[in-house]
Amino acid sequence: MIRFCTALLRGLISVWLAVTAAFFLLRILPGDAVQAQAAQAGMASSAVEERRQALGLNRPLLEQYGTYLGGIAQGDLGVSIVSSENVSQILWSRGVGTLRLALSALVLSIGIGIGLGTAAGISHYSISGRLWREGIDLLIAVPIYISGTLMVMSGVITDGLGAALVLGLHSAAPIANTLSLALLNESGQGYVVVASAKGLSDWTIIWRHRVRAVLHTIVPVISIQTGFLLGGTVITETIFSQSGLGQSLLDGVMRRDYPVVQGWVLLMAICQAVIYGLTEMAGYWLDPRQRGDAV
């Protein structure tokens, strides 16, 4: 219970820090959406001030911040300055596709990462192991925007599956790297020698003993990569022309649409906090040593 409450408190603090940073950083930059619209439409200065007053942008910054936090507490994320559309509705209508993309990429990254890491870890000193290692290093080195652009140019997969595959491969590399090193360190342990002496098959030793013993090492990596996946949707949705929160964020940043950007940050922070809590509990149950420390 104490562990759960600690994780919950940590998650709430991280969400608060994220939305606070987004709120103040957006307002440090000069100009806002109203001024941008005024410059394009040739609005008079009096009309601009009326619009800013109606939106509360002329109030003191701390007062705006308090109003914003109060709105979050009541489930009110405000309305878009540009389109006057409710931010909650924007997140709901476009967030489903983005979260589906991130979840698909997460599943692919875990599966590919475990497969690559196992192949590289159990054959580390062979030629095939060297090839697996080179493949992992290549995935780590290539940025998302390059791999995504190459996939689109190749014309092989250009839809949502391609976006999920690009994200999944990019996040699978750190998982594979961590797992392969953990397997290498465990190769000389006593339980491996005993299992081999009992006549167990190599397949059983690898998957039921070696991989199972080090599986907890990739849990923190998965948690970190989840944040990268959520942020990477901005790039992949743009490259693969997918309609989602990534495109909404890009438009919101370009147009200085504060409520939309703040809503996106809030949603991503909540998702990251939830996933971090889940991965922490998964590591707790996968690693008996953590349960022993809690006793």
Image (spheres, rainbow, N blue to C red):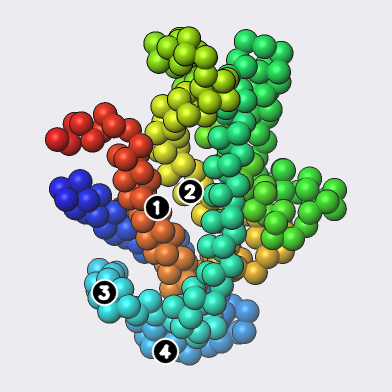
Q: How many residues crowd around disc 3 within 10 Å: few (fewer than 14), some, or many (20 or more)?
A: few
Q: Which residue in the structure is indicated by mark 1?
A: 275
The alpha-carbon separation of the residues under discs 3 and 2 comes to 26 Å
Q: Which residue in the structure is indicated by mark 4?
A: 50
The disc, 3 or 1, on the residue closer to the chain's N-terminal end is 3
The disc, 1 or 4, on the residue closer to the chain's N-terminal end is 4
**Mark 2 element type:** helix
Q: Which residue in the structure is indicated by mark 3?
A: 73
Work out whether residue 122 or residue 37 is closer to the camera in this orientation and state it.
122
- Left-right relation of 50 to 291: right
The label nearer to you, 2 versus 4, is 2
Residue 231, percent from left and from top: 52, 53
Would you place residue 22 above or below residue 212 in this image?
below
Residue type pointed to by label 2: Thr
Q: Which residue in the structure is indicated by mark 2?
A: 226
Work out whether residue 59 or residue 185 is closer to the camera in this orientation and state it.
185
The disc, 2 or 4, on the residue closer to the chain's N-terminal end is 4
Work out whether residue 147 or residue 202 is closer to the camera in this orientation and state it.
202
**Mark 3 element type:** helix
Q: Are marks 1 and 2 in contact (CB under 8 Å)?
A: yes
Residue type pointed to by label 1: Ile
